[in-house]
Image: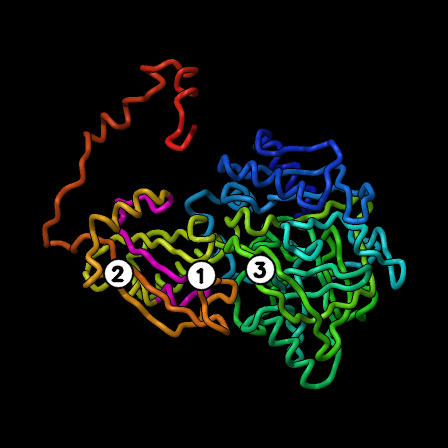
Amino acid sequence: MTKDLPSFITAYAEAFPQDVIRISKPIRVQWECTEIARKFERQNKFPLIIFEKPITTEGKLSDFPCMINVLGDRRKLAFAIGSTFENVAIDWRKRCEMPLTPVMVQRKEAPVKEKMLKGNEVNLLSLPTLHHHEMDPGPYITAGMLTTKDLEQGAYNTSFQRGFIAGPREIRCYISPRTHNFYNLKAFCSQGREMPVVYWVGHHPSVLMGAHTRAAYMEDHYHMAGAVSGEPLRLVSSETLGDDFLVPADAEFVIEGVMRPNLFRPEGPFGEYPRYYGPQRHSPVFEVTAITCRKEPIWHSFMVGINNNYGGTQEEGTIYSAVKRVVPQVQRVYVPVSGSGRFHAYIQLKKTHDGQPKEAIMAALSASEWVKHVVVVDDDIDIYDDRWVLWAIATRSQWDRDLVVVPGCHGSQLDPTSKPGGISTKAGIDATKPAAPKRFPFRLSVPEELEARIKLEDFIDPEALSRVPGARDK
């Protein structure tokens, strides 16, 4: 069975019916959908939400629904590739080691060709694209996979890069420097040529995970999409960019167009993943030539700046692979939401030598431009719980000997503390115990047998248990 967004929704709803919410009342795409997501986030919940009757920025009821949180948490990412909460990032990365060549299909076999608009028929403002935050200039494409080809080998590069819908057929795309789409744009501009470009929106999460995997320049991301999804990506020719520019046949939407050389217009401010507004920038203009879609498509949006699980989980696999090469004793890596979903990384080691934590820190900081602070802990620390990582820092580190500080690094341009060009100071903390045979105090414990045997439900009424407030409940 071909993997696509409808098949994922069906399978996930059967497995986790309580985690799929359908909102049938009309709701505005301007801020109201965002507030629904914010209210769930305050409860640390990220259900897959389908807004069945979104009202567009034009004030009209949309012809199709909008969905958020498809990639909302590790449970969904793990389910998409048949993994587990703990192993999803590692399994994701391992799959990338076996790229799959895509397959071509005819237009009549491609669901994304069921409806088609070209030229003046296109009106991007009729899409249920979310206007996320108060200071955003308007609606943004956030879960669109921006796709270009390099001039030398014709390899496809795909990446989630935001696009401001500035008019019926105009999208202003923020393509940050050091990304491969930026390199491709620069190459086309240097030759004075317009660059063919596509946004494809809505697909099976495993396909999106593969297509957005960090890869070397000129490695083909369509091959990576097949690798992670476990089946070759089905491709079909575009409508206005030539038969040799291929697009995913099973996407919900494909938006086609061109970027003209050196045509830039103001874009932003926009509320990004660090949970701050980024500045207005001059960004390249995507002139839309066509939209194709399914007969009954679903629009997919990221809740940028609210739910940061996806980007961090992706980075975990990259960091794990880099650290594993230098310190084979690495157990797990976690990039927590508490670090804006990308700026902090926790590394768990089964330490055998006192030099390993610093080696792990240096490998992690060089593996990811986004990661700013690394904390290395022992294998008895639950890295998925900030409380215990902070406890390890408090009780197992002395910063005069365990702190590594590296100024002048490439970092994220979206970090509000970085210097121009994204130059950032990075750091790491060794919060591990001394390696054997050195002694260190034992953690408090009870016998393992007793820990497994004693269950609260055996001693306390379940209803009473459910009423016990959390530490932050008012």
- Please tell me how crowded label 2 is: few (under 14), some (14-19), or many (20+) other residues with Cα within 10 Å: many
Q: Please state which of residues 470 and 474 is positioned toward the viewer in this rendering.
A: 474
- The amino acid sitting under disc 1 is Thr
Look at the numbered disc 2 and give the secondary structure of its residue.
helix
- Relative side of 472 to 190, left or right: left
Look at the numbered disc 1 and give the secondary structure of its residue.
helix
Q: Position of residue 432 (x, y in %)?
A: 22, 53
Q: Which residue is mark 3?
A: 212
Query: Residue at coordinates 58% horizontally, 69% vertically from top-left?
Result: 176
Pick the quarter of the image with the N terminus.
Answer: top right
Q: Quadrant of residue 18?
A: top right
Query: Residue at coordinates 77% horizontally, 46% vertically from top-left?
Result: 56
Work out how far the residue at label 1 is from the one at label 3, CA to CA, in angstroms. 12 Å
What span is in magenta? Answer: 363-384
- Please tell me how crowded label 3 is: few (under 14), some (14-19), or many (20+) other residues with Cα within 10 Å: many
Q: Which residue is mark 1?
A: 318
- The amino acid sitting under disc 3 is His
Query: Residue at coordinates 13% horizontally, 54% vertically from top-left?
Result: 436
| Circle number at residue 357 | 2
- Relative side of 132 to 28, left or right: left
